[in-house]
Amino acid sequence: MYMSQDKPIGWWAQNLHRTLEDAWDRALAGEGATRREWQLLNVAARAGSTGELAPFFTDPGAARDLVGGLVDRGWVRVDGDVLTLTPTGAAAHEGLAAVVQAQRARSMRGITTDEDAATVDVLRRMAANSAPAQPG
């Protein structure tokens, strides 16, 4: 088995996940938002469904609470399971976008577009290979 720098890929994947979550939280905290709020604002910016974030929430109640918080702040409206931005939410989304772009640039420093694409492709295929087999 190939192991990069004496650690298996699962270790690096978990380490990256924790490190990125912390970096996003730090970057957005200065703007009074969290990463999950940013993700919900992105969904609302294209009038998407709250169900799009299911992979990020193990507790559906947490997603409802987060949406409720954005509604209370006047940033989003909810119609069924569709989120849309209010004018205040659109301004917040625009301001946070600059913070997000800067954080993405920091995270990708020294990584080429080809390296990024290859890494994502490998991770996607590993996930597909590890998923339960579909019957039939």
Image: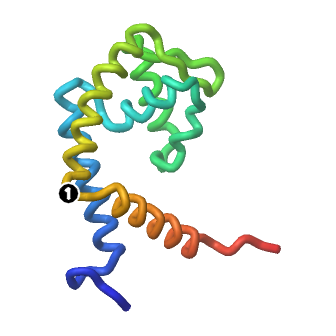
How many marks on residues?
Answer: 1
Measured as percent of width and height from the top left, residue 65 is found at 44, 30
Q: Which residue is mark 1?
A: 110
Q: Residue furthest right?
A: 136
Local crowd size for mark 1, using a 10 Å CA cut-off: few (<14), some (14–19), many (≥20): few
Q: At x 41% / y 15%, what residue is drawn?
A: 90
Depth check: 12 or 100 in front? Answer: 100
Where is residue 121? Give x, y as percent: 47, 65
Q: Nearer the viewer, residue 30 or 90?
A: 90
Instruction: Give the residue displayed 43% in from the left and 8% down from the top.
Output: 87
Residue 74 sits in which quadrant? top left
Q: Is residue 104 left or right of residue 36?
A: left
Q: Secondary structure at mark 1?
A: loop
Q: Residue at x 41, y 21 (%)?
A: 70
Task: State the image coordinates of residue 123 (x, y, percent, origin top left).
Answer: 45, 67
Query: Quick one: quadrant of the N terminus?
Result: bottom left
x, y (%) of residue 28?
24, 32
> In which quarter of the view is residue 13 placed?
bottom left
At a point 48% along the width and 16% down the height, the residue shown is 85
48 relative position to 95: left or right: right
Q: Amino acid at mark 1?
A: Gly
The image quadrant where one finds the C terminus is bottom right
Quick check: 69 above or below 104? above
